[in-house]
Image (spheres, rainbow, N blue to C red):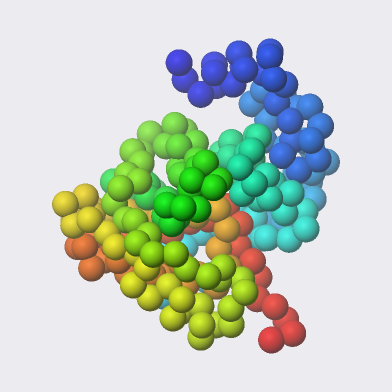
Amino acid sequence: MDLKTKRALLHLIYPNRCPICGSVIGAQDRFCTDCESRLTLYDDSFCPPEADSFTAVYVYNGSVKPAIKLLKNGICGNADYALGMALAEKLRKTDIISRCDMLVPVPMWKADIRKRRYNQSGLICRIISAELGIPVCVEAVSKVRPTAPQKLLDKQLRSINLTGAFIAVPELAAGKRIMMIDDICTTGSTISETASALRKAGAAEVHSASCCKTLPDKKK
Ligand SMILES: [Zn+2]
């Protein structure tokens, strides 16, 4: 059964809801019209140092925050579909995605996956994969030790915090053109460290994309 049919059937039992305000929306809708109109589209030239390219759909701000919160709180609702479809649509417009061999979610530490019951970037990958027909390879790179939440650290500590935290599997990554997927990108250090691990394992290209991107704090 394809994703569209599955959603139409599920909608009869559990009506689809906007992941921002919670109002009932159509089976294939991502957000309600009001919430979608308040989202800010991301359009910047940022790229994490070790990645070949980067793209994001929305600027991370208060308008999109409830959807990201839902995605991270272990319930998810329609957040993976809404954000995943939006990212698939953005990626479809790039020439990079058509030559990528696989999608790889930014990995989480195993204890964190147990707590949340899923890796939210993995859920986003599943939606993009169903929409664009590109396989997902979750095992290509793993997080091998816990790290402190990046948002609590300054720029220097963020980089130290992640050094050596990711290891990629050469048998899966070597020679591959990879699209790494994350839900939200702040400084890009997580994507950069993961991309670096994939490169060490022989990946030919490591591109990256996230549903949301924070903008630099103007005060700094
Ligand atoms: Zn809404």
What residue is rendered at 19% in x and 62% in y?
Answer: 202
Residue 123: x, y in percent? Answer: 50, 40
Say if 68 sits above or below 134 in the image: below
What residue is rendered at 66% in x and 70% in y?
Answer: 215
Residue 33: x, y in percent? Answer: 79, 37
Horizontally, residue 30 falls left or right of residue 120, namely right
Q: Is residue 97 visible?
A: yes
Q: Quadrant of residue 132?
A: top left
Say if 125 sits above or below 198 in the image: above
Which of 151/15 is in front?
151
Q: Quadrant of residue 42?
A: bottom right
Residue 169: x, y in percent? Answer: 22, 56
Q: Is residue 88 visible?
A: no
What residue is rendered at 77% in x and 53% in y?
Answer: 63
Which quadrant: the N terminus? top left
Horizontally, residue 189 falls left or right of residue 96, namely right
Q: How many marks?
A: 0
Horizontally, residue 187 falls left or right of residue 58, namely left
Residue 96: x, y in percent? Answer: 38, 53
Say if 213 sits above or below 88 in the image: below
Which quadrant: the C terminus? bottom right
What residue is rendered at 47% in x and 68% in y?
Answer: 147
Say if 23 sits above or below 27 in the image: below
